[in-house]
Image (cartoon, grey):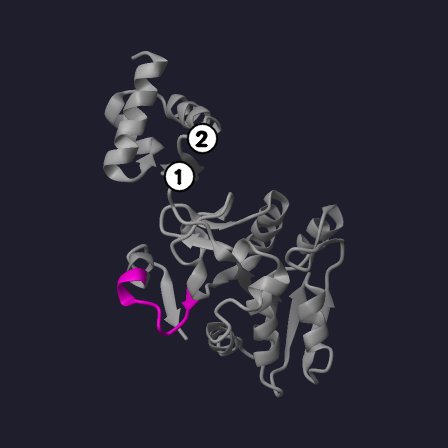
Amino acid sequence: MLTRQRKELLLSRLERDGQIVARSLSEELGLSEDTIRRDLRELAADGLLQRVHGGALPLDLPPSPAMGNFSARQQIASDAKPAIARAAAAMIAPGQIIFIDGGTTAVQLARALPADLRCTVVTHSPSVAVELAGHPQVEVILIGGRLFKHSIVAMGPSTLEAIAQIRTDIYFMGVCSVHPESGISTGDFDEAGVKRAISGMARRTVVLASPEKLDTTSPYQIAPLSQVSAIIVHGEAPEALVARYRDLGIEVIKA
């Protein structure tokens, strides 16, 4: 099959099925998975589809409002974020070492920790660290680096080096987007790498997903949903929407 024919077939399947799974299609067509992936990369470069882990999705998936700056994001889902934060705080057992990500929901989580909770919080977010400065029982380990102003978090080689030295019980991850096919994603390439590193050192990764993040995509994948232990969503999230994540074997907690 010629390259042009393969690409036309890929676009046709994408329009018909709404997604392309490279492994399944390679088996069906008797082509190598590398060939399929190369064609998908070229089609993505031409602006004809969106590459995701394991295949491709159409371009018309909605972008996430969480791509805005920190100040603007504080106004989004302002009622849902404290509820999600309280549900996350309830998951923490005394004595645990947890990692709290940056972002507006993460700041709410720091505020929601009970005054009598004794634990260790690791964070690369100055905003989270400041919220916990007056907490009587929480030891705070603040990881430094270059300040990424969009999310108010530290990034860079020194950040990654410090992350690699600390194993945590739970990583409460903030993301721009959560999607059943494209997984968890964010708007910055380096930030996606930092989040992957944190998740790799955590026993469990719990995603804090305010309503505007569900069923959206951002440019840079952090990980497929198979690497997520649980997703905390607002209690008013439609059951039909969250059922898609439960069907993947992910625990969905309604706050």
Q: Nearer the viewer, residue 10 or 223?
A: 10
Q: Residue at x 65, y 55 (%)?
A: 150
Q: Residue at x 26, y 62 (%)?
A: 240
Q: Amino acid at mark 2?
A: Gly
Q: Any magenta on residue 232?
A: yes
Seen in the picture, residue 210 relative to 178 is either above or below; the reply is below
Q: Residues within 10 Å of mark 2 (few under 14, many from 20)?
A: few
Would you place residue 246 above or below residue 81 in this image?
above
Please name whichever residue, 90 or 11, is drawn nearer the observer in this view of the structure: 11
Q: Position of residue 235 (x, y in %)?
A: 37, 74
Q: Is residue 26 visible?
A: no
In the image, is residue 66 above or below residue 122? above
Residue 63 rendering spot, x and y as whole percentages: 45, 49
Helix or strand or loop: what does disc 2 sit on? Answer: loop
Marks 1,2: beta carbons within 8 A: yes
Disc 1, SS: loop
- Disc 1 marks which amino acid? Leu
Quadrant (top left, top right, bottom left, bottom right) of the N terminus: top left
Residue 192: percent from left, percent from top: 57, 48
Going from N to C along the chain, the mark reached first, 1 or 2, is: 2
Q: Is residue 39 above or below residue 137?
A: above
Q: Is residue 22 magenta?
A: no
Residue at 28%, 67% in the rendered image? 239
Task: Name the residue that disc number 2 marks.
Answer: 47
The residue to which callout 1 is attached is 59
**Which contiguous range is marked in magenta?**
230-241
